[in-house]
Amino acid sequence: MERPKSIARYQAALALYRGGFLEGSYCDWAIPKREELEIRSLQATTRLARLLAQSGALGQAMELLRSAVALDPFREESHYGLIHYAALMGDRAVALSRYQSYVKLLKDELGAGPSAVFLDLADRIARGQSVPSL
């Protein structure tokens, strides 16, 4: 599928998502569906961000990923994209600051650290090396 058509389709799909399914309802049967739709929305957002970044629209891609981080602050894929795209834009300071914030969040809230792939990206950025291409 052509990238512009894929972008348009993801944008249309995400425009249909209006937030949590039966948000505010405490019916046990609604919770799994709400979580499934939220995950699908986050996956679509990440895919759209990647397509936009590959098309050269890094700023738009980062905007989408910031909204994904606001929805799920622990989702590594969203943070990775934000840091990766900031580095590709040449903004190492923003990339490293975002990385440090994410590492602190993981440590403080989960007692965990980032994945090896994430650590490699941060190391490359800190050393001024090129980051993986899109």
Image (cartoon, helix red, strand yellow):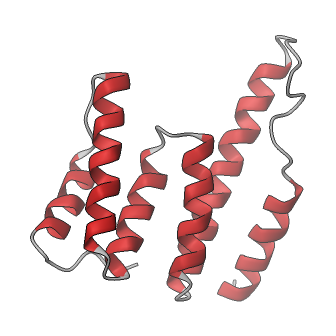
Total marks placed: 0
* Along the viewing direction, whichever of 97 and 18 lies nearer the viewer: 97
Residue 57 place in picture, x, y as percent: 56, 84
Residue 45 place in picture, x, y as percent: 65, 59
* Along the viewing direction, whichever of 87 and 44 lies nearer the viewer: 87
Q: Quadrant for the N terminus, please.
A: bottom right
* Along the viewing direction, whichever of 101 and 77 lies nearer the viewer: 101
Q: Is residue 54 above or below residue 40?
A: below
Name the residue at 51% across, 79% down: 58
Residue 79 place in picture, x, y as percent: 43, 53
* Along the viewing direction, whichever of 89 and 81 lies nearer the viewer: 89
Q: Is residue 92 above or below residue 105?
A: below
The quadrant where residue 3 appears: bottom right
Is residue 84 toward the left or the right of residue 55 in the image?
left
Residue 12 place in picture, x, y as percent: 84, 68
Q: Quadrant for the C terminus, please.
A: bottom left
The quadrant where residue 110 appears: top left
Is residue 112 toward the left or the right of residue 43 in the image?
left
Name the residue at 85% across, 12% down: 26
Name the residue at 85% across, 15% down: 29
Name the residue at 38% across, 82% down: 89
Q: Is residue 98 above or below residue 23?
A: below
